[in-house]
Image (cartoon, grey):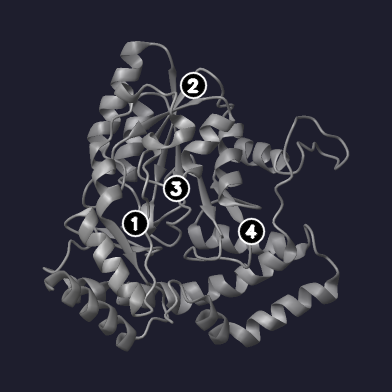
Amino acid sequence: MLQFRDLKAQYNALKDEMDQAILDVVASSAYVMGPKVKEMEQAFADYVGVKHCIACNSGTDALLLALKAWDVKAGDAVFVPSFTFFASAEVVSMQGATPVFVDVDQDTFNMDVRDLLHKIERTVKLGKLKPKAIIAVDLFGLPADLKLIKQIAQRYGMYLLEDAAQGFGGRIGDQKACTFGDIAATSFFPAKPVGCYGDGGAVFTNNDEWANLMESYHLHGKGTDRYDNIRIGMNSRLDSLQAAILLVKLKAFRDYELEDVNRVAERYTQKLKGVVKTPEIPKGFYSSWAQYTIQLPSKEMRAKVQEALKAAGIPTAIYYPIPMHRQTAFALLDPNENQCPVADRLADIVLSLPIHPYLSEEDQDRICTLLTQTLHS
């Protein structure tokens, strides 16, 4: 059976380096906060091009650390795209603040700047919440329109948090994802563009004050001494084994994986253009292709295609079947203030196909052929 994101193929390609990296950590006995973590943080900061990288134990915690550094709290409004994973909005509520859901662009799946402006202006006019931050998600590997969103954030005196959980490796021009926000967060969940063998995440910033705060928060609120806790924090450490794994994977990602996954995506688009609506990459943008997501004519046709592919041993996924503004956890929010019709439509028609740097042309041809035949049957 085909793999949706073939981590076995990746391991086989990196086996010698990976096994040695893991054995070295085991032999060192430095399992938690060992030197590999600092080495990994420096390597990722250098790759992205920022001053500080702080590793933590999940992409969710990375987002939460940023909000803590900015003292986001009750009475604050944080603007979040509705078409994304739950964590992007969950952390807002964890801080006691209120998420305001923004619709997305039909072609890129990312935050619709026009609706963002509309939602900000309405929030200001209502006067019940203070606009505090924007969480712009780099969905499926494609950076959001971050330069424009940054201008909007500055205009209204808000922070910009770049949620690059899926976007690590993406670019706008020559500028890499994880550098556009005041703080950026990424995830190292195994299926992400660069993933470890468990949960993991990191925050990125050039701001020394915020970096010191996040360093403290992710280690129980510690001060200058490990047993002097000066604030209430959390236990969100990345262990040394995961750091060693990420160092091996970052090298492969930089050397060939990012280029190869883009080649796979380009081939999908060539073969499926005119068959289904394929993902659109704006001029000057570059995706790291966490997912390759097509749009089908209807929910019924999506179910038909998904079933045909499943019968042939081809896995697919629906990201995301329920937009944020429809989640049960947010049912108490005013639906009139959180309307997102494009997100509603996308939830019914999107389908993500297998994509990874190791996908063969033969398997890709089989996927495209069966998909085309099912649509025309």
Precedes in sequence: disc 3 or disc 4: 4
Q: CA distance from mark 2 to mark 1?
A: 28 Å
What amino acid is at disc 3? Phe
Q: CA distance from mark 3 to mark 4?
A: 25 Å
What amino acid is at disc 1? Leu
Asked which secondary structure carries label 1, the reply is: loop
Residue at x 51%, y 43% (from the top left corner):
87
Residue beneath label 4, please?
Answer: 41
Residue beneath label 3, please?
Answer: 85
- Please tell me which residue lies in front, 189 or 320: 320
Judged left or right of residue 273, residue 259 is right
Asked where in the image residue 61 lies, by quadrant, the reply is top right
| Disc nearest the viewer among 1 and 4 | 1
| Disc nearest the viewer among 2 and 3 | 3
Judged left or right of residue 353, residue 51 is right
Asked which secondary structure carries label 4, the reply is: helix
Precedes in sequence: disc 2 or disc 3: 2
Residue beneath label 1, please?
Answer: 142
Q: Is residue 33 above or below residue 120?
A: below
Instruction: Answer few, some or many: residues within 10 Å of disc 3's Cα (few below 14, many 20 plus, some between 14 and 19).
Output: some
Residue beneath label 2, please?
Answer: 76
